[in-house]
Image (tube, grey):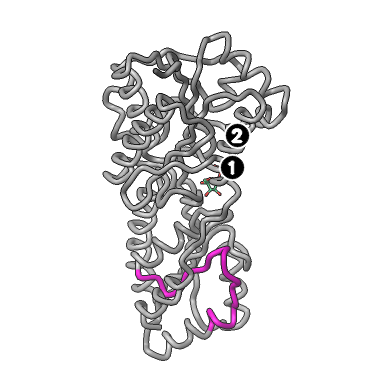
Amino acid sequence: MSEIKKIGVLTSGGDAPGMNACIRGVVRTALYHNLEVYGIKSGYNGLIQNDFVKLESTDVHNIVQLGGTILKTARSKEFMTPEGREKAYQNLREQGIDGLIVIGGNGTFTGASAMLREFDLPVIGVPGTIDNDLFGTDMTIGFDTAVNTVVEAVDKIRDTADSHNRIFFIEVMGRDAGFIALRSGIAAGATDILVPETVTYIDELVEILEKGFLKNRKSGIVIVAEGDDAGGAFDVANKVKEKYNHIDTRVTVLGHIQRGGTPSSYDRILGGSLGYGAVNALLEGRKGEMVGVKNNNLNYTPLEKAIKHHKNIRTDLLKMARILSNY
Ligand code: F6P
C-alpha cells in the first residue's frame, strides 16, 4: 500500500508544447487514485515562495490543446542554492506534500536530484523540453511540435529563397544539442545541417553550396543549430560569404516561435501518457527517476543518469540528409 496521499506538480525551465497535456495527465490520474494534487506556480520559485494551488479536475478542463504551461515556469537561481532548497523542502512539508512531479529538462532534473539527495524526497521527473536532449527517452514533450513549427517556417522561407535565388541560413534552437536541427532539416529537405555535436568545416559547406550552384540550383537552405561550433546563423553566413561572395545570402533566426503554439497530437499523447506514468511511478514507490518513452513503452531512468549520460545524435543521418538533398 502506497503512503503517498498528496502530490505536487510543477513545470520548470523552458516551456514546451504538451506540458499542459502532461499536467492534465498528472491531475486526472492522481484524482482517479484519490490523491490530492497541488500545482506549484513558476517552477522551483513557487516552491520557495509557497505558491501552491489545489488542482481539481475542472482546472485542467480544456487545456490539452494549449501550448505553454498553465502553471507557468521559470529558471530559478535561488533553487540552485542549498538555502533555497531547504526553504522549498520546508514548504512542501508544511503543505503535507509527500511526492513531487517535475516536468522539464536538464536544469529541472538537476534540482530534483538534489532534493532527493538532500531530503530523500520522492520525486519523479518528466522530460519536457523542445531540445530532446535527455538520455533515457526517445522523445521529450514539445520536440515534435517544435520540429513541425520549424518545418512550416522553412517551407515558407524556401518560397522566397527560390524566387530570389538566395541561400538562407536558418537558426533553430538547441544550445547544446542538434536534435531540432537534424530532424527539421531532413523534413524540410535542407541543403546542409550544422549541429553542435559535429565539427563544422566552412570549406566543406562552401563546396556543397558550389556544387549545387553548378547544378543550376541557385537557392538553398542551411539549418544551423544555435549552439554550432562555427557560431550562430549570422556567423556562419559571414564565414561562407568571405569564401564564396557571389551568392546572395539571408539569415533568419526562428527563436521562440519554436517554443509556442498548439501541441501536435504526438506531444499531447506523450504528455498525457508520461503524466499518467509519473503518478503511477510515485504510487509504486519509485523515486529519483525520470519516466520516458522507449520504443513506445514507458521507461524509467535514474535522474542522475538522465542528466549525466549524453544522448547521442545520429550523425549518419547528417550524411543521409546531404545525399537526399542531392548537392
Ligand atoms: O531549453 C530549451 C531552450 O528552448 C533552448 O533550445 C534554448 O537555447 C533556450 O531554451 C532558450 O532559453 P530562454 O527562453 O530562457 O532564453
Identify the residue shown where x is 38% and y is 40%: 17
The magenta segment: 189-206
From the top left corner, tell me how far across and down residue 46 is, in percent.
56, 21
| 165 or 151: nearer the viewer | 151
Q: Is residue 190 magenta?
A: yes
Residue that protrudes farthest toward the bottom in the picture: 214
Residue 153 in sight in this render: yes
* Amino acid marked by disc 1: Glu
| 80 or 92: nearer the viewer | 92
Question: What secondary structure is marked by label 1?
Answer: helix
Q: Is residue 235 magenta?
A: no
Question: What secondary structure is marked by label 2?
Answer: helix
From the top left corner, tell me how far across and down residue 251 is, in percent.
50, 64
Query: Quarter of the picture for ligand 1?
Result: top right
Q: CA distance from mark 1 to mark 2?
A: 7 Å
Q: Earlier in the sequence, mark 1 or mark 2?
A: 2
